Amino acid sequence: MTPEASPAKHEQISELSEAIKIHSEPFRRLLAEVGQVIVGQHELMHRMLVGLLGNGHLLIEGVPGLAKTTAVACLAKGIDTRFQRLQFTPDLLPADLIGTLVYQPNDHKFVVQKGPIFSNLILADEINRAPAKVQSALLEAMQERQVTIGHHTYHLDDPFLVMATQNPIEQEGTYPLPEAQMDRFMLKVVVRYPNRSEEVQILERMSTTEHELNIQPVMSPQEIATARTLIDRIYVDEKVRDYIVDLVIATRDPAAYHLSIGDLIQFGASPRATINLTLAAKANAFLGGRGYITPQDVKDMALDVLRHRVIITYEAEAEEKTPDDVVHAILDQLPVP
């Protein structure tokens, strides 16, 4: 579907599309490089690039052994930038994450000891293992891209991306993420089991005692910054913009769109979902080599943007409904422009 625009706008979009085809090439190289280690998981890898391009954070959920941590580590190795893996545990303290003031007896003064959050790509492994005070320490860093230690505020380097993993089936000794924390994640990606052919490839590739991640850096932070400037220029038609707004508002007031799912929804998505869905659709169009977004771009990204922002009712849980079911119902029934 082509955007409805004036001839002059069409020419601008065509020029932008040509530039995007050139500048999206490093991201395809990155996918190919990571694909030498990771078998399958194409959706996960694609969503990580969307988060990187859209300047948003990812929550990656899946059972153990699905290469969630490995995929994030491989992505970090493929980009010539700094990477920190943080293993979240029940005894972790906020100071272990953001840093603290350390007293130096020789100088009789306190100096700032910055924590591992001062990096570019952060892997928050098993984020729901840490208590709420540690999870909340991430809030300022994720939203404002800054950290306050003592009386001073320090800005984080760009790019800054948090990719958090969590296990959905083991609840003992975990601390569920509050809604305020969940809303700061641009996407929630659910990782599935590989199919049979992928499982065979995994066995052939990983059935040795040596599991070194031989990933070479194929992209620089400057290329990410350039790509983001192009994404900001991607054309959003008025009808597509209205479609995005309608999708989000339908999670809050489904009756206004004649959707009979109101008894399943306790709370709908926030305005942050509207912003993130637009950015995610733009990033999807960028990876597709286009200077405009289509309704299909929106539909492709809607589930990952909305599933963790829709809070279902107890009645919905009793009927074994999930937020995914609600989002699918909205996507299926809402008219597409």
Image (tube, rainbow, N blue to C red):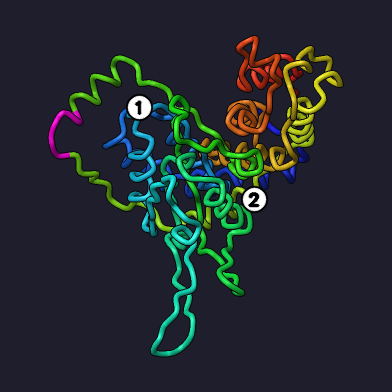
Of 123 and 298, the residue lying toward us: 123
Tally of numbered discs = 2
The residue tagged with tag 1: helix, strand or loop?
loop
Foreground disc of the pair 2, 1: 1
Q: Is residue 285 left or right of residue 193?
A: right
Q: Please say whether residue 215 is one of the residues in the magenta stretch.
A: no
Quadrant position of the C terminus in the picture = top right
Q: Quadrant of the N terminus?
A: top right
The residue to which callout 1 is attached is: 40
Q: Could you say which disc has been placed on residue 318 in the image?
A: none
Whichever of labels 2 and 1 marks the residue nearer the N terminus, that label is: 1
237 and 298: which is toward the camera? 298
Is the Cβ of the residue at disc 2 closer than 8 Å to that at disc 1?
Answer: no
Q: Position of residue 139 (x, y in %)?
A: 60, 52
Quick one: which residue is furthest to the left in this view? 209
Q: Amino acid at mark 2?
A: Asp
Q: Which mark is residue 232?
A: 2
Q: Relative to 256, is 302 on the left or the right?
A: left
Kindly identify the residue that appears in the image at 84 percent across and 18 percent down: 255
Mark 1 nearby-residue class (10 Å; few <14, some 14–19, many ≥20) = some
Q: Position of residue 148 (x, y in %)?
A: 58, 67
Query: Quick check: 68 above or below 231?
Result: above
Q: Quadrant of residue 303?
A: top right
Residue 222 seen anywhere in this rendered image of the structure: no
Q: What segment is highlighted magenta in the picture? A: 205-210
